Structure formats: structure tokens, C-alpha cells
Image (cartoon, helix red, strand yellow):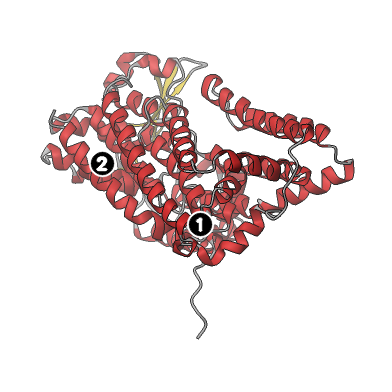
Amino acid sequence: MKKFKFPTAQTILLLIAFVAAIATWIIPSGKYEQLAYDADSNVFIHMSNDGDKTYKGEQSTLDSFGIRIAYEKFKEGKIRKPVGIPGTYNQVESREQSKIEFFLPFLKDSENEEVTYRQNIIDFFYSPIEGIQDSMEIILFVLLIGGLIGIVNATGSFDAGIAWLAGRLKGREKLLIIFITALIALGGTTFGLAEETIAFYPILIPIFLAAGYDAMVGIAAIYIGSAIGTMCSTTNPFSAIVASDAAGISWHSGLWGRIFMLVLCTLFCMWYIIRYAEKVRKDPSQSIIFNQKDEIEQMFLKNKDEKPVFNARKISVLICFALCFVVMIAGVSSKGWYFHEMLLVFVIGTLITALVSGLSELEIMEEFMNGAKDLLAVALIIGLARGIGILLEHGLVSDTLLYYSSSMVEGMPKGIFVNIMMFLYAGLSFFIPSSSGMAVLTMPIMAPLGDVVDVGREHVVNAYQYGMGLMAFVTPTGLILASLAMVNVTYDKWLKFVMPLLGWLTLITMIVLSVLVYL
């Protein structure tokens, strides 16, 4: 018998998509009524099965619907998505699509957008297409980065820079893990550094390899840094701030608890990564991915036996390359940039890098296309993961899960309540992977439950962040499969590495949540 080989990321996502489609036939479909704010007309729109109704844009409207959010949050644009109205959940009749919709799902009746459909085999096959369409900006971002990396690689600048840095780090390799993990965690906690880290793997993995570590150490420093940062968000507008606003509290509430968790969990993760890394550096056979050592080194250290010259042209290329990320991070953190602006930065950066590279026009185009081709698999994974979310959205199962989850925690002792809430958010994050989408949908419903059991709403916000954050370490519908694909490491190897860490982090989080809720 042939030895079992773990499926690729694409196959895993297709299997999950198939299960998601089946789930829409099992889980009852339902929906909360929602309240949306129209900034142009300064009105609230009440969306229900009976049709849409408009109300004045004022605090009394929110109060009448039992939504404890300051009106100014909507007016200032801090809450842009519709919020769920507590106590309005209703099951809706599930039905299959008509024959013409079955064979041509893109001809769905626009007037019946709010009517749920059991997702059938055609929807399953169509979901990757919709997922790719919906993720086009991030897919273009990934392909553009791949093209830029292809040009920089062709100049030999990466090899020269890595050789220079490896010499500087001799005997101090641990500093690399500490610095990268801390820096990315800082980006995650302040402005939500997550999808952008996809760009860091081709740059940083060769540095970790040159330092004597395996690629798993590089993946861990980058991905875990981002996951811990976003899990313990402090000023992240996409989770901490939007969730606090949706819960009707100041984002400062519970801040010191989140800072404590950020420091504690980051230090623990650094210790865990360094412990594994030093074991691998002393004995490479201890690596979880030892059987891929030659393959990965060939991918990232193609000229490892040569001693490249670090000249002025290569330094100029690396400066141009690095400035793309500096400008991107500055824009995202201070100007609120998103993928449109980030794409523009890399288009301009690619053109400037090409001009100083010394390559001919033909070489530039060939290397750009080859680099983009290398990341095509990653782009496909991103689209497949989004397609799963679309299947579940069309099936209207997320609100049903939210309704039954909220019913479970009513009347519990507050220590148990806050931990159950964390696990509920961990489970819901599979169906609602967007942190901001989760916040505005669930907080108006979940936060008032804390009042009933005498738990401050800031603890509900923390439970939401920690639940989603812990799940992000392993959930296939998040960024992990795309990140692993950047380095050609399979999901089972990642699970073997990260599951002990996840167990310890879960225990730490439960203890901290339980203590803080009684202080």
C-alpha cells in the first residue's frame, strides 16, 4: 500500500466547502432583523422580512430597538455595517432553487436576495468562482507581490542581503525570532496586520534558513506573531474598536487586560518558538519538516553555496523593495489604506525596482510573470476559502448558530459564562471569519447577555477577540493555508507544530478571563 499523503490545501478547502453546502440542509435557516445607517440621508433603515422601513438618524431610534450603541459611532463612520437587533431572530423557510436557478445560479432573482436557498451541487461548484470574484483585491495583491519578488530574485539582491545578514546574526540567531515575532504582533494589535503578512514569507524565510533554522520557525514567527497581535488587539480598528463600539462601550474599557494578555501570550509564544528552533539548529533531524529540507532550501536558497557580492545596485534594489512595505504599513496604520491603495504602492514600487534592477525589458517581464506564477496557488487558496463563507452566507445558517449560542449562556455563573462565550466565538469564527463582520453582527446580541449575569461588556469583547484569535491558529478558512502554501508546507505538519501551543494558550486565556471577570 502506498503511504498516505496529506491532501493539499486546495483539496482540504473543497472538502470543507462540500460539508458547508450539506450543513445548509441540516441547520435551520434564520435571520436577525438588522438596522443599517444611511449617512447620505441621515436615516436608519430597519431591514426585516416585512420590508425596509426608515427612521430618523438619532439616538432615540437606537434606544427604541434596544441597541446600546452611541449614535455618533454611526455618524462618524466607525460602524458601517448593519447591526443585528436583539430579540428579532426568526427562522425562514429553506427551499431549493428553481430549475433555471439550479443550472444558472447567476440568474438568481434579485428581488429574492433575502430568501435562503439550500446550497446544492451547482452552488458548491460555483462557490470557488464567487470566492475568487469576492477576493479579487487580495488575489491581485498576492500576484503583484509575487511578480515584484521575481524581479528582485533575478538581480541576486536577496541572496546577497541574506548572506550579509546571516553573518551579522552569527551567535545571536534568537534575536531574529524575538524581533520578527514582536514586530508583527505589534502590527497586529495596533492596526490589524494580517493579510499583509503574506508578503513577508518570501523575504523572511530565507533569512531564517540562513540562520540555521527550518522554514517552520519562519512560518511560526510571522503567522503566530500576527495571530497573537490580532487576538490581543488593543487599538485594532477591525476588532477591538469596532467590537467595543458595537457593544456600546468605550474601546478603552478592558484595555489593560488586553495589554497584559498581549505581553503574556507573546512572551510565551516566543519561548515556544525559540525552544523548537534551537532544537532544530542543533540537530536538523528534529525538524518536523526535515524530509522537505532540501526541497525548501532549493526554493529559497537557490545559490546557497555561492558567496554573492553585495554591491550598490543590489542595495538599491533592496531599498526600493523595503520601501514598498514601509509605505504600505505607514498608510494602513495612519491613513486607513486598504487594498486599492496598497496595490498602487506595489505597482509604483515594482516599476521603480525594475528601473534600478539593471535587467532588460524582456528579463523584467519574464521574471515578473514567473514570480506571479509561483504565487498562483496561494491566490487560488484565498478564493476557495472565501467561497466557503459565501456558501454559508447564502444558506443563512450563521444567524441560527448565533441565536442558539446566545440562548446557551443565559443565567450562567459569570466565570463559566465568559469562558463559554469565548468558545462560542471560536466556533462562530469558522462561519463568520471576518472580525469586523462578527463584531457588528453579534455584539448587539451577545453584549446585553453580560448585563444579565453581571459581567462587564468589555469582558464579552475580550471573549470575542480571544475566541476568534485562538481559532485563527488552525482554522482552514482563515489565512493559515495560504501562508503554508507560500512555503510549501502541508497543514498536518503545521498542526503537529502548533497544537501543543494552542492548548497552552487556551488554558492561559481561560485562567486570565476567569480572574479578570471577578476583579
Residue 128, how many percent across, how many down?
58, 54
Instruction: Please report the residue visible at 62 percent of the width from the left and 25 percent of the height from the top.
Output: 327
Question: Where's the C terminus, which quadrant?
Answer: top left
Point out which mark residue 509 bears.
Answer: 2
Q: Amino acid at mark 2?
A: Thr
Whether 289 is drawn above or below 160: the answer is below
Sequence-first tag of 1 and 2: 1
Camera-nearest residue between 168 and 52: 168
Q: Which residue is mark 1?
A: 97
Position in image of residue 176 (x %, y %): 50, 40
Q: In this view of the protein, which residue sits in the foreground, 326 or 66?
A: 326
Crowding at mark 1 (Cα within 10 Å: few <14, some 14-19, many 20+) = some
Say which quarter of the image contains residue 231.
Answer: top left
In the depicted structure, whether residue 126 falls above or below residue 56: below
Q: Nearer the viewer, residue 369 or 341?
A: 369
Tell me the CA gap for discs 1 and 2: 44 Å
* Type of amino acid at the residue the image marks with label 1: Gln
Residue 56 percent location from the top left of the image: 39, 15
Residue closest to the eye, 38 or 427: 427
